[in-house]
Image: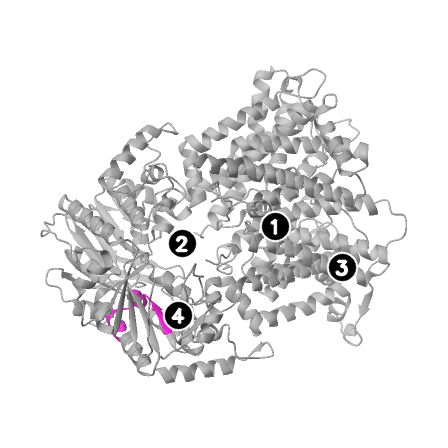
Amino acid sequence: MAGWRRWLLSAVLVPLVSVICGFAVGAIAIVAAGADPLMAYSALFAGAFTNHNALAETLVSTTPYVLLGLAVAIGFRAGLFNIGAEGQFYIGSLSGVFVAYSIRGLPGIVEVPLAMIAGMLGGALWASIAGALKARFGAHEVITTIMLNYVSFLVASYLVDTPGLMLARNVSTPRTPDIDAGAVLPNLIPGSRLHLGFVLALLAVPIVWFLIERTTIGFRLRAVGFNQNAARAAGMSVGRTIVLTMALSGALAGAAGIVQILGVNFHMTDTVAAGYGFDAIAVALLARSNPWGVLPAALLFGALHNGASFMQLETQVSADLISIVQASVIIFVAAPAIVGWLFRLRRAPTETVAITQREVDAPTT
Amino acid sequence: MDLDVSWRQVHALLGENGAGKSTLMNIVYGLLRPDSGEILFDGKPVDLHSPLDAIRLGIGMVHQHFMLIPPLTVAENIVLGHEVANRGVMDLTESSHKVEQLSERFGLQVDPRERIAELSVGLQQRVEILKALYRGARLLILDEPTAVLTPQEIEGLFTIVRALVAEGKAVIFITHKLAEVSEVADVITVMRRGRVVGTTTPKESKSADLARMMVGRTVLLRVEKSPAKPGAQVLKVDNLVVLDDRRHVAVDNLSLDVRVGEIFGVAGVEGNGQNELIDALMGLRSIRAGKVQVDGREISNLSTHARLKGGLGLIPPDRHRMGVVLELSVADNLVLDDFDHPPFARWLVRQFNAIRDYAVKLIKTFDIRLQSPDQPVGSLSGGNQQKLVVARQLGTLPKLLIAGQPTRGVDVGSIEFIHRQIVSERDRGLAVLLVSSELDEVLSLSDRIGVLYRGRIVAVLDAEGADRDRIGLLMAGAS
Amino acid sequence: MSEFLQQLDPVSLLSITLITATPLTLAALGGMMCERSGVVNIALEGIMLTGAFIGYAVAFFTHNLWIGVAAAVLSGMIIASLHAVLSISLLVDQIVSGMVINIMAVGITGVFYRTYLESATSAGPGTLPHWNVPVLSSIPVIGPIFFENQFVTYAMLVLILVVHFVLFRTVWGLRTRACGEHPRAAETAGINVHFVRYVNVITSGALAGLGGAYFSLQQIGNFLPNMTGGRGYIALAAMIFGKWTPVGAFGASLLFSGSDQIGSRMQSVFHVQIPLQFLGMLPYLLTIVVLAGAMGRAIAPAAVGRPYKKE
């Protein structure tokens, strides 16, 4: 099969068909819940795109998905499952918001980068813990990152609820102080919530692409992801690469967290909206770990997220339903065989990155 | 393709790597399905869907890579699939008993209660044969059985094979080694590129004839080389001690030295510490005790990266595991050691033009057959992949090349090419440490030979005039 | 000292430790059978959650706790077979397959809980009854801990022994271990590797489903979204720490739940002032420590995690 045809098949057709199949499964669930799929989906679409300010709102929802999707995708390319994107998101939010409300009076051009750096550092450090555990002890990053997620929720809760730490004074619900006016990300479309963070997220995509495909760091990452033993025999430090990759991944996740605060929430509460991390995995899978693919995938998830509440309002179909759609989409993406079988396609050799599990051999000492 | 095997016969299936011998036998054993044609057993056509069918007919197979489960015992491995049990509950005493009976009958002594992980390779092979016999094999297929045996153990195997045949069984003996075939086979079928080229007997065809049938042209059976002119010492290993993955001593106070312009060959049966030695020299495994010096400098504390930069080169024994990254392109693999330095990268950004030029140069010099330097290495043939590994190392102009099994799984044409490359580099001053379990390769390439037994060099001799039998004895531990 | 002991109440401590170790042990047993045959099962969390939900929902509508328990087990088997199909036959990466199931479980249970059960006004089915084993429960110390429990805990204790026996003394156990260590060798011995793995994965679903029933039918008598709280992952750590043996998994689970209990008594008994959140972190941190310490030395079944392709 010609090269470009194969690319079309695996990079475009399979995700596309997977999405369609995912919606089909969702339709079945909607019927099971007693509603009309067409009505539900048109409400979903309206809520995501056509209602007043819907598109802007959808882009607002898309922003964190882009950054988180990139975070998980980088991990996948090195053979690492970063399930901890969620925890890194929160730790990044914590470190970033602290800077953003502590520094007062400086212009945005100074405060925003400072807060962003703080957020990215927080996420990077948190992720490096899991990276170091894997590199040094061979501890499987799936479980360690999930555990660190739970720990991060508790850390956030502790810091935000305790007076004298990050709890703001004179507030009705526990939360941090508001960020300084200088740290607020400027609005892009007046009357909507769309903020500069969206542009930052867009910029992150080519940067990450360049990093992976054109730099020595990316080469190291990919080599380790494909074959640790050969990388080691060629003189690469596998352990350092693992920690570095997790740090980069965590930095992106942390960026997602701080961008949400600087652009949307302007402070941090002690309630933790779970689910971002898993959605990030879905986005990365749908994008097949390709940075450019993260954009449309994130947009889909942003649209689902945004349109779901309107759908619930209009048709009584629970917003949780979209997670069924999401999970179905992932199944179909991760199992190209199903799609192929459904459409009697001949299995094209998958040349895109295989998401495989790697065990680091414990250091032989 | 056609193949005829009779009872009471040792039938050798001869061909070079990749000729299709194993594939054919895997079909006979039910592991693979044929696309067309038929198989007749005892005159009747059979349709084999799985090894169970083959076993039921009385076909047994001993694979090149043992199908044994290390944490389980000998008895458990042998009875697996045909367990001695009472309503699902295993009877371990009875299992051991049966194994002992079988063991006695065929003269293959093993302790049923020992775990496979504790057994030597030769003993493991015995367990494999017992496994087939336990299931009532009348036709026994042996896939490259001598790859892991000392010359003496090989003799032992031949005796067992002849005994089985005398009992009325038939044995199919897959190999690529001409010498063995003449010794043990009654009938020889030669395969090349998936077809039968001819069927003959040892009396009718000499080694040279067989070789020609295997490859289609006259084959260089011995490397032509001028005598070595060894210079100063490059590598000095002193009393090296290295542990294996299970923390047992694998390299046991080993000492050797290699000089400029010389090929030092380490002869030994696989499993005597070769891999651990190579790992330790390259910094992939830590050194328990002892010293390693290159050009007088102690390198035991240097990282792999530092050693590569310092002039070491490695052809790893297992190229798929350590030699290449199959998913990356040929060009990327060729610069795998050097990718983060100029000219291949400037300030973290990779310079693809420089990489490409370098790759094209190496591809030409080493005659690597491919369509484009950007194609993934996985799409190359085994021989070309190995040439790529050699190219990558020699391209960096090392001082010392450690070559582990450099021609394993490679077609004859590429073997010749790689051997010639190594010799010509030697003539230009490269020092080579050759570690190979193919005794013929060691004998024909080396200038000096060190025999490795149980982690130490038990003898060092000149290759010129070396006595093959004597080396064989040394490899087996005799003094 | 005696006042300290009274405050600590070791019998109650041990008893609660055993009880709270129930879901961990069951899930760990399931994960262990699965991994012994060569399949990683990250979906334990999702299966437990689904089991908890289905068990409760069925018990609610049928007003019968026992049918609920059976439904929990059955639902676990069904979800596990999805994991099996994805990872064994369709060659989906086993971790991805497991995570997908976890995501789906959260979503589906959330949706259906909110639609049908959240606003339910009728009384729930209650919790499983306590059964005291005659004679044995009067033994001091041991009696109250082991012999005054509810069904799921008793089932766990029995299953530990059963699984141990099956794994190490039966033909099925031998074949399972063979498939997990060297599937190709097992196949050449005539064993159907895919079949063995399928059955083991579905068994793990049954065990994890039962573990889920603990939450909604034994502990609380209700369903709360996400009530499993990461225990499915902790169970995996328990399995690793226990070196893939049933008794080991049990011991490790006791360790984890014990640390939780001691943590919650920190203030009252040990008079140590530690913020609530840090106490809550204890089991998770312990899991991380265990993984860092145990991983390098624990040897998993050699072929675990890799899909087996018949050539």
Q: B238 or B347: nearer the eye?
A: B347
Label 4 to label 3, Cα distance in Å? 46 Å
Position of residue A326 in the picture relative to residue B476 (left or right): right
Q: Nearer the viewer, mark 2 or mark 4?
A: 4
Q: What amino acid is at disc 4? A: Met
Q: Are marks 2 and 3 on the same chain?
A: no
Q: Quadrant of the C terminus of chain B?
A: bottom left
Image disc number at residue C71: 3
Residue farthest along the right direction in this orientation: C122
Q: Quadrant of residue B220?
A: bottom left
Q: Chain of mark 1?
A: C
Residue at the disc numbered 1: C98
Q: A20 or C54: nearer the eye?
A: A20
Disc 4, SS:
strand
Q: Chain of mark 3?
A: C
Position of residue B234 in the picture relative to residue A72 (left or right): left
Residue A342 sits above or below residue C300 on the image: above
Q: Are marks 1 and 3 in contact (CB under 8 Å)?
A: no
Residue at the disc numbered 4: B61
User: Which stretch did the figure color magenta?
Assistant: B140-155
